[in-house]
Image: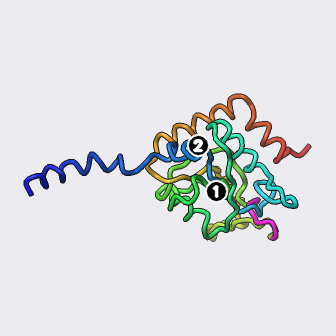
Amino acid sequence: MRFLPGLICLLPLLSPLAHAELIDDVNDRGELRIALEANTPPFNFKDGDTLTGFEVELGQLLANELDVRADFIVTDEGDLLQGVESGKYDVALNHIALTPELKDRFDFSEPYGKVDSQLLAKKDEQPRPMVLVQALTEEKPSVSAPVELAIPFQKGNPAFQASLASAMQRIKADGRLAALSAKWFPKPE
């Protein structure tokens, strides 16, 4: 019984050791588990049996930069973020807007793009504008501002966050992200 107070004092020091850092898990598995819905072209979708799209190619680039294999897991909207939160998936790469509500639940990569919120629609839906409540004095509603897209992952993984940030910076610096954006989101001429 006289060791009990000493053990209780050591518990705060041991708790970080009980929780492995996400980057260690990714490296041990040799793969980055990427959740997506695969139903929103050009972000991510199936072309026959082949998974393709901007975010699929971005996920492959990120996994390559982390020196692991990309393991894409197609899931539904209800499981996507819950799966990341529970550790079932490492990240979700599904055109997720960086919002204050989600920042409370997840850590995020730096933004990888901006998109008009009205363009976000599922494959079988028509794009529809997100209507914002306007003051009664305005005659017509304004178009919603672009949203930043980022990659959520479990909170409390600073080494993973640093690795992901470094990988994203290399992809941006050498022009691969710009080329990917131009390929999947060509500018109208």
**Is 130 situated above or below 189?**
below
Q: Nearer the viewer, residue 38 or 121?
A: 38
Please state, as top left, top right, bottom left or bottom right, where the C terminus lies in the image: top right
Apparent side of residue 10 relative to residue 54 in the rendered image (left or right): left
**Is 131 situated above or below 52?**
below
Q: Secondary structure at mark 2?
A: loop
Apparent side of residue 7 relative to residue 73 in the rendered image (left or right): left
Q: Residue at x 70, y 66 (%)?
A: 130
Label 2: few (<14), some (14–19) or many (≥20) C-alpha neighbours in 10 Å: some
Marks 1 and 2, the one that precedes in the sequence:
1
Please state, as top left, top right, bottom left or bottom right, where the N terminus lies in the image: bottom left
- Whether residue 120 appears in magenta in the rendering, the answer is yes
Label 1: few (<14), some (14–19) or many (≥20) C-alpha neighbours in 10 Å: some
Q: Which residues are magenta?
A: 119-124
Q: CA distance from mark 1 to mark 2?
A: 12 Å
Apparent side of residue 121 relative to residue 9 in the rendered image (left or right): right
Q: Amino acid at mark 1?
A: Ile
Q: Residue at x 85, y 44 (%)?
A: 187
Q: Nearer the viewer, residue 149 or 17?
A: 17
Q: How is the image coloured?
A: rainbow
Provide the major secondary structure of the magenta segment.
loop
- Residue on which the image places disc 1: 96
**Is 24 situated above or below 95?**
above
Task: Determine the residue located farthest toward the right in the rendered image.
Answer: 189
Q: Position of residue 27 (x, y in %)?
A: 56, 42
Q: Are marks 1 and 2 in contact (CB under 8 Å)?
A: no
Task: Determine the residue located farthest toward the left in the rendered image.
Answer: 2
Q: Nearer the viewer, residue 76 or 179?
A: 76
Q: Position of residue 68 (x, y in %)?
A: 64, 41
- Residue on which the image places disc 2: 110
User: So how many labels did they put on this image?
Assistant: 2
